[in-house]
Amino acid sequence: MTGAFLIKRISHKFSPYKILFSSSMLIGFSQLMLYFADQPVLTIVSFLIFGFSVGSFFPTAATIFQTRVPKDFHGRFFSFRNMMDRFIFQAVLLLTGFLLDAR
């Protein structure tokens, strides 16, 4: 929720594409931080960064998709997007588990 609140506050200063890229980079950084899962503090910080960045990413992506996609394609596009979101969520979940158990 804090990510979505921050995005609402800064969306008039930054391009939505810059916000998406920054959020994606933070998601990747938080995943890489899980390599150091043997240190409990870094694990908690990693999940905090991940939650914040995902909370920033999804509202921004939804806004872009709803404003840029023509109305004729909304049904098919959002159905396909829902399938891709589920697949990506499963991949991130597997990667998180792997990085927690890799050491």
Image (cartoon, rainbow, N blue to C red):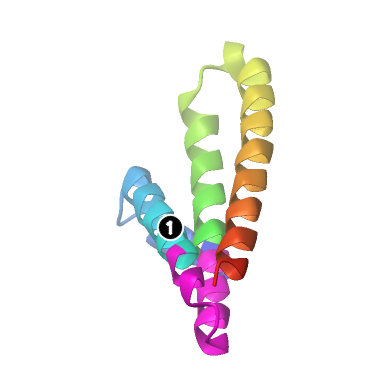
What is the x, y in percent for residue 44?
A: 57, 81
Q: Horizontal placement of 102 versus 36: left or right?
A: right
What is the x, y in percent for residue 94?
A: 64, 52
Q: Residue at x 55, y 83 (%)?
A: 38
Q: Helix, strand or loop at disc 1?
A: helix
- Determine if the magenta segment contains residue 37: yes
What is the x, y in percent for residue 68?
A: 45, 26
Residue bearing mark 1: 28
* Residue 41 visible, this orientation: yes
* Residue 11 visible, this orientation: no
Residue 12, picture quadrant: bottom left
The quadrant of the picture occupied by the C terminus is bottom right
Residue 47 versus residue 100: which sits nearer the camera? Answer: 100
The quadrant of the picture occupied by the N terminus is bottom right
100 above or below 13? below
What is the x, y in percent for residue 31?
A: 49, 62
Residue 40 versus residue 25: which sits nearer the camera? Answer: 40
Q: Residue at x 56, y 66 (%)?
A: 102
Say what amino acid the circle numbered 1 marks.
Gly
- Look at the image and give the residue range highlighted in magenta: 32-52
Residue 88 versus residue 98: which sits nearer the camera? Answer: 98
Dominant secondary structure, magenta? helix
Q: Residue at x 35, y 49 (%)?
A: 21
Callout 1 crowding tier (Cα within 10 Å): few <14, some 14–19, many ≥20: some
